Amino acid sequence: MRIVRPTVGDIVLTVAVAVVVVAGTAGAAHWHTAAAARGLSPSEAVWLVACALPLVLRRSIPLAVLAVTAALAFSYYASGLPGGPAIVAPTVALITLAYLRGPVVAGIAGGVLAVAVIIEVLLKGDDAGTLDPRLLGFVLWVMVAVSFGTVGRLRQANLRSAEERVAEADRLHAEEQRLRIAREVHDVVAHSLAMINVQAGVAAHVADRRPDEAKAALLAIKDASRAALTDLRATLGVLRSGDERTPTPGLGRLPDLVATAAGAGITVVTEGDAGPLPAPVDVAAYRILQECLTNVVRHASSADTVTVRLDRTEDGLEITVSDNGRAVRQETNGGNGLRGMVERAHALGGDVAAGPVPSGGFQVRARLPLGGGR
């Protein structure tokens, strides 16, 4: 048994019930002609206070509290002393039992009390053929008290369920934001470091024999690192501020991607025109193209040409990126880059297909519905 420490509310409720019971019974005794001469004695007042006193532990041992309060209240009524609202104490106890343990337990406990009272009333009844109206009243009392407690229990369960749903929604939202930021950081860092790695290799290879080419490679490294730092600062700024908006590069920066790839020795041929796009679609298209070009630099063997085709339809944008490399890249095994492209497309209701082509090289096809950006 786990004892719950009584709260201020428990103590206040117990005192209030005791005051109501004692004051109500004293008033009834005063106006009752048979008891008016003597009023309510101190022993009777103590008895009534004892009826309410167990309520202070109603949340710890509700069933025992119901048994004690009911025994004290009903024995008081059976003693022939001035009547009053002593029934309030077991009523509160029964409501609490239904609230904490449910309607089944409370209904059984209330039924046991009802049977005991019915037996006692029938045994004392003067006319066995007449149904004492107190029996019906007592049964209704049990039903109403259990109903009140059950309604409170259901309401509390609904509130708890609503709070859990809100907490789960917040958790899922935070997880979605974390994944979004992770994709942004991966795209920025992976693309820039891949280009920097290639240019650094070029600079190291020609530094002694062709210093002009080495200088050009170092300048390309400088440009790539500056662009990476700009995007990374914007992404980290989202984390610091708690703003839900992520950096929004778009296809307007496609020439920068082409120039960066050219610096790594890759010729990019662009075909088609995407036209104006909703911001989410524009961002996803840019990041997918960025990752495709990064993968060509990192994984495609002997690739020197990439063809980027943009096909704009009424309801979507199709992106096709093909290279002329020979080897199948490791990204087909489910690297973070390909997974990030798939996640971006799926978030907009689109899809991504990637794999080697029979004529050689590797191809990525992405379909992005325009409606996903609304």
Image (spheres, grey):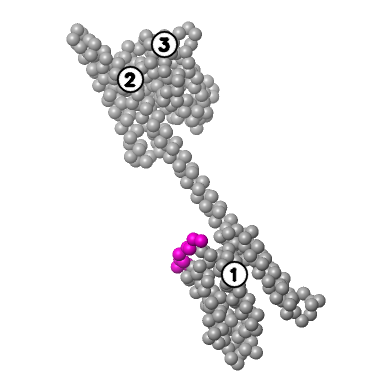
**Is 255 situated left or right of 278 in this image?**
left
The quarter holding residue 131 reads bottom right
Residue 195 visible in this rendered orientation of the protein? yes
**Residue position marked by numbered label 2 in the rendering:** 194
Label 2: how many residues lie within 10 Å, few (<14), some (14-19) or many (20+)? many
**Is 196 situated left or right of 53 in this image?**
left
- In the rendered image, residue 31, in percent from the top left (x then y), is placed at 62, 87
**Nearest the camera: 253 or 302?**
302
State which tag comes first along the sequence, 3 or 1: 1
**Residue position marked by numbered label 3 in the rendering:** 327
Label 3: how many residues lie within 10 Å, few (<14), some (14-19) or many (20+)? some
Q: Give, as a single range, the part of the protein colored magenta.
A: 1-9
Seen at 29% across and 20% down, the residue is 196
Amino acid at dot 3: Ala
Amino acid at dot 2: Ala
Relative vertical location of residue 292 with respect to residue 279 in this rendering, above or below: above
- In the rendered image, residue 327, in percent from the top left (x then y), is placed at 41, 11
Label 1: how many residues lie within 10 Å, few (<14), some (14-19) or many (20+)? some
**Residue position marked by numbered label 1 in the rendering:** 67
